[in-house]
């Protein structure tokens, strides 16, 4: 099997936000799509390691904000490469903007947000697949939506390391060593061994 074929699938990139027990949080996901139009429903896939995942299991409500091509790498570092368990990603309370469902959305480097209410949860092992009714949808700008392919090509910094080993294709972390353990998980972004490629080997 050629796993690189999997990377030919096209994805967008979104900030997934939720609120639970009075706490705001958000993470980056690439798995969100409309699945039916009557009623209007979307599905999202969320890694169980993400704190936002547990918040949505509890609250059943979330927003997704669609990122645009001008989003800098720092947006991914902020929402994607640190956990809401350790830091408050919405520490600047005065900067929080909220949708009608009271959950925060992200207004910078995004062109729209969608609010949704969970109707089904499917346990997929590492991830949960949430099916949700769209309760609101707001267009913010005409800026072009960011795709995962664009992120890989243009947004993330180019690898300039002289280290020998395996580089994380998501965040650029380098594992030094000839053999990357199959169960290795990136300490920066949490992605697994499938998202690593050899560097200087
Ligand atoms: Fe990584």
Image (cartoon, rainbow, N blue to C red):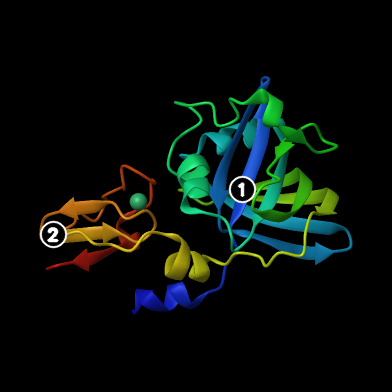
* Nearest to the observer: residue 88 or residue 35: 88
- The quadrant the C terminus occupies is bottom left
Q: Which residue is mark 2?
A: 179
* Nearest to the observer: residue 47 or residue 16: 16
Residue placed at 34% from the left, 43% from the top? 188
Q: Label 1 CB, ligand 1: below 8 Å? A: no
**In the picture shown, does residue 53 fall above or below 155?**
above
Q: Is residue 173 left or right of residue 57?
A: left
What is the secondary structure assignment of the residue under circle 1? strand
- Tag 1 or tag 2, which sits nearer the N-term? 1
* Nearest to the observer: residue 66 or residue 178: 66
In the current view of this chain or complex, which residue is farthest to the top? 21
Residue placed at 55% from the left, 43% from the top? 27
**In the picture shown, does residue 193 fall above or below 19?**
below
Mark 2 vs mark 1, foreground winner is: 1
What is the secondary structure assignment of the residue under circle 2? loop
Residue placed at 13% from the left, 57% from the top? 163
Q: Position of residue 57 (x, y in %)?
A: 63, 35
Measure the alpha-carbon separation of dots 2 and 1: 33 Å
Q: Which residue is mark 1?
A: 15
- Judge the density around disc 1: few (<14), some (14-19), many (≥20) Cα neighbours within 10 Å: many
- The quadrant the N terminus occupies is bottom left
**In the picture shown, does residue 95 fall above or below 172?**
above
Q: Position of residue 67 (x, y in %)?
A: 63, 56
Residue placed at 49% from the left, 49% from the top? 76
Q: Is residue 129 left or right of residue 36?
A: left
Q: Position of residue 18 (x, y in %)?
A: 67, 35
Q: Is residue 48 left or right of residue 172?
A: right
């Amino acid at each position: 099997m050629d796993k690189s074929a999997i990377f030919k699938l096209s994805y967008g990139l979104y900030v997934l936000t939720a609120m639970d027990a009075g706490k705001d949080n958000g993470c980056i996901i690439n798995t969100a799509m409309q699945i039916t139009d009557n009623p209007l429903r979307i599905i999202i896939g969320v890694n169980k390691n993400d704190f936002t995942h547990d918040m949505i299991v509890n609250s059943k409500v979330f927003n997704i904000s669609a990122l645009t091509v001008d989003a800098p790498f720092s947006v991914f570092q902020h929402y994607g490469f640190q956990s809401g368990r350790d830091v408050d990603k919405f520490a600047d309370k005065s900067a929080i903007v909220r949708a009608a469902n009271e959950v925060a959305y992200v207004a910078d480097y995004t062109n729209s947000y969608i609010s949704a209410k969970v109707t089904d949860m499917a346990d997929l092992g590492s991830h949960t697949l949430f099916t949700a009714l769209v309760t609101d949808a707001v267009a913010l700008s005409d800026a072009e939506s960011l795709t995962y392919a664009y992120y890989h090509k243009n947004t993330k910094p180019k690898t300039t390391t002289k280290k020998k080993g395996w580089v994380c294709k998501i965040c650029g972390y380098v594992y030094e060593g000839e053999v990357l353990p199959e169960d290795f998980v990136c300490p920066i972004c949490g992605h697994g061994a499938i998202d690593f490629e050899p560097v200087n080997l």
